[in-house]
Amino acid sequence: MQDKARFFAYSTWVVMISLAIMIFSNQFLYLVSEPGWLGLAVLLGFGLIYLNLAYSAVKRFIRKVPAPTQAHYVLGLFIFIPPISWILFVRESFTSNEILLLAVLALACGLGVFYGNRAGIRARYEYIQKLKEYQKEQE
């Protein structure tokens, strides 16, 4: 890994934001077990929040990586660690609804990492092109 300090910075802010989301949304976790559209809406909401977090963090990280790397998978894991630890260790009951929530969060983090990597590669290509144009203008 070529830029360990940058990866450390990204991993710490990702863990802190993920943990903050879990702490502030803990009061809504019981709604996942509600039958009907309310439970599905809350489940979808949690999934979309973590999908967006993983997508934006990985896209931002990959954009300025000097060489292709696989560190974005570890970043996605760091996003998933706070909610899984919160649900497993802090919540009193562990039912099938929590398993469903963890599955949705894992899927959301995985999709966010996958599509964030693709978007980050495109953004890195555009960044390099703009950097080359800027260097040509400076000469």
Image (spheres, helix red, strand yellow):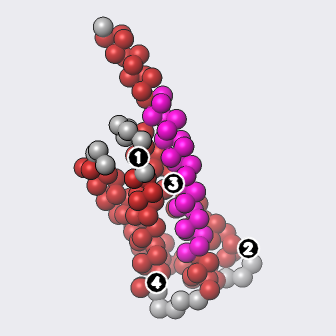
Distance of label 4 from label 3 (alpha carbons): 23 Å
Q: Residues within 10 Å of mark 2 (few under 14, many from 20)?
A: few
Distance of label 1 from label 3 (alpha carbons): 13 Å
Secondary structure under tag 3 reads: helix
Q: Which mark is residue 37?
A: 2
Mark sitting earlier along the chain (1/3): 1
Closer to the eye: label 3 or 2: 3
Residue 109 lies in the magenta stretch:
yes
Q: Amino acid at mark 3?
A: Val
Residue at 49% across, 38% down: 121
Mark sitting earlier along the chain (4/3): 4
Q: Are marks 1 and 4 in contact (CB under 8 Å)?
A: no
Distance of label 1 from label 4 (alpha carbons): 31 Å
Of residues 72 and 13, the one nearer the viewer is 72
Question: Where does the image place residue 23, in percent across and percent down from the top left?
Answer: 41, 73
Q: Residues within 10 Å of mark 3 (few under 14, many from 20)?
A: many
Q: Which mark is residue 92?
A: none
Residue matched to label 1? 69
Residue matched to label 4? 88
